[in-house]
Amino acid sequence: MTIRLSDEARQLAALFEAETEATVRDCLVDEETDRVIFLIKTGEMGKAIGTGGEHVRRVESEIGRPIKLVEDADRPEDLVANALAPAAVYNVTISENDDRLAYVEVAQEDRGAAIGAGGKNIEAARRLAKRHYDITDVQLT
């Protein structure tokens, strides 16, 4: 599956990589929540975040928007779980029926964190799962 980035997303990804030396695998500019979502190469989240979150704060200040970092994964189940962090995800099951759906089990006390304010966390998970694994929806169970 080919991922296409807008000019703005390419510029933001290049800026983030230059500031952090972490590899950006994808970049989504979320106009609705006015934030940027960076998909970071597996194993490079520490580099992306920086000591005490310094890299995140510096890039947010530079671009004037909040950012969300998601660690990439080789399996769709893991990518969905990573996108819903900081919620503790117990299990992700991918339905292979007519539509590919991801069913996510989270603790009741973590449902709010998984959904995020105004649904922004679960929407980020949906967008990334669709772009990278052709999953049509992510649902909490």
Image (cartoon, grey):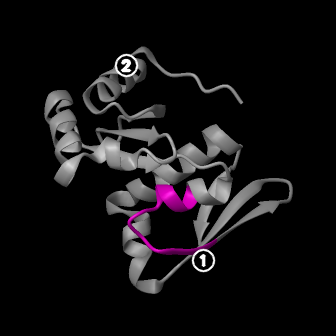
Against 118, residue 103 (above or below) is below
The amino acid type of the residue labelled 1 equals: Thr
What quarter of the picture does the N terminus occupy? top right
Can you tell which quarter of the image residue 38 is in? top left
- Residue 69 rendering spot, x and y as whole percentages: 38, 47
Q: Answer whether residue 90 is magenta in the image.
A: yes
The label on residue 3 is: none
Query: Foreground: 126 or 58?
Result: 58
Reply above or below: 9 against 131. Answer: above
Q: Residue drawn at (35%, 40%), measured in percent from left and top? A: 32
Between 106 and 71, the residue placed more toward the observer is: 71
Residue 85 sits in quarter: bottom left
Quadrant location, the C terminus: bottom right
| Range of residues picked out in magenta | 80-91
Q: Mark 2 points at which residue?
A: 8
Q: Position of residue 112 (x, y in %)?
A: 38, 73
For the residue carrying disc 1, how many other residues have a C-alpha within 10 Å: few (<14), some (14-19), or many (20+)?
few
Residue at point 61%, 48% (across, down)? 129
Where residue 137 sits in the image (x, y, percent)? 64, 55
Residue at 68% of width from left, 50% of height from top?
Answer: 136
- Secondary structure, mark 1, is loop
> In the picture shown, does residue 79 fall above or below 102?
above
Q: Specify whether 32 is left or right of 124.
A: left
Direction from residue 34 to residue 94 in the image, left or right: right
Image point (55%, 44%), residue name: 128
The disc, 1 or 2, on the residue closer to the chain's N-terminal end is 2
Residue located farthest toward the right when viewing the structure as drawn: 97
Q: Which amino acid does label 2 sit on?
A: Glu
What's the mark number on residue 141?
Answer: 1
